[in-house]
Image: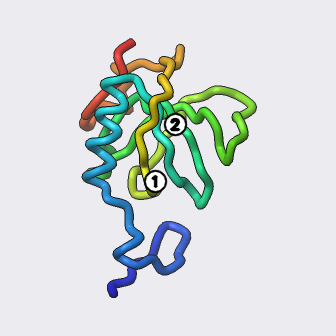
Amino acid sequence: MQQNQNSSGTPETADSAPDIEQSVHMLGFAIANKLCVRAVYNRGSVTLAPHALFERHGAPHIDAVVHDRDGVAPAEEKLGTFRLSGLRDVILTSEPAKVFAGFDPADERYGEKLLAAIAV
């Protein structure tokens, strides 16, 4: 079985690596339909409201609002950037995603390649 190093430097088997292509499709669907997703990020469970799916330096990323991390709501609501290679076990939920007031799909950070953006 092939092993790679993940971002924390620990070995990771090819079987446990995230399916980026599947995540891209699921996140695009979630954005288009204003739905939240659940995933594992940094070994913790997160519920995210994805707002933008884009490429930066050739790698897919999302900007999303964290609804909860390990069942606990964050102290403040903010838009965060997540590299898709760091998200594992992404699943669609039926929970609606509310549009973050500070989100601007015309922001220059999406200039390289915006794949999907939540309707504002």
Residue that label 2 marks: 48
Badge 2 amino acid: Leu
Image quarter of the N terminus: bottom left
Question: 99 left or right of 120?
Answer: right
Rendered position, 61 above or below 100 = below
Q: Position of residue 57 (x, y in %)?
A: 31, 50
Rendered position, 26 above or below 12 = above
Residue count near mark 2 (Cα–Cα under 10 Å), binned few <14, some 14–19, many ≥20 = many
Residue drawn at x 49%, y 67% is: 7
The image quarter in which residue 19 lies:
bottom left
Secondary element under disc 2, as helix, strand or loop, is strand
Q: Are marks 1 and 2 in contact (CB under 8 Å)?
A: no
Disc assigned to residue 87? 1
The image quarter in which residue 13 lies:
bottom left
Q: How many tags in the picture? A: 2
Residue drawn at x 49%, y 31% is: 49
Residue drawn at x 38%, y 44% is: 61
Badge 1 amino acid: Leu
Q: How is the image coloured?
A: rainbow
Q: Position of residue 5 (x, y in %)?
A: 44, 76
As rendered, which of 44 and 85 lies closer to the eye?
44
Rendered position, 117 above or below 84 = above
The answer for how far apart the CA atoms under marks 1 and 2 are is 11 Å
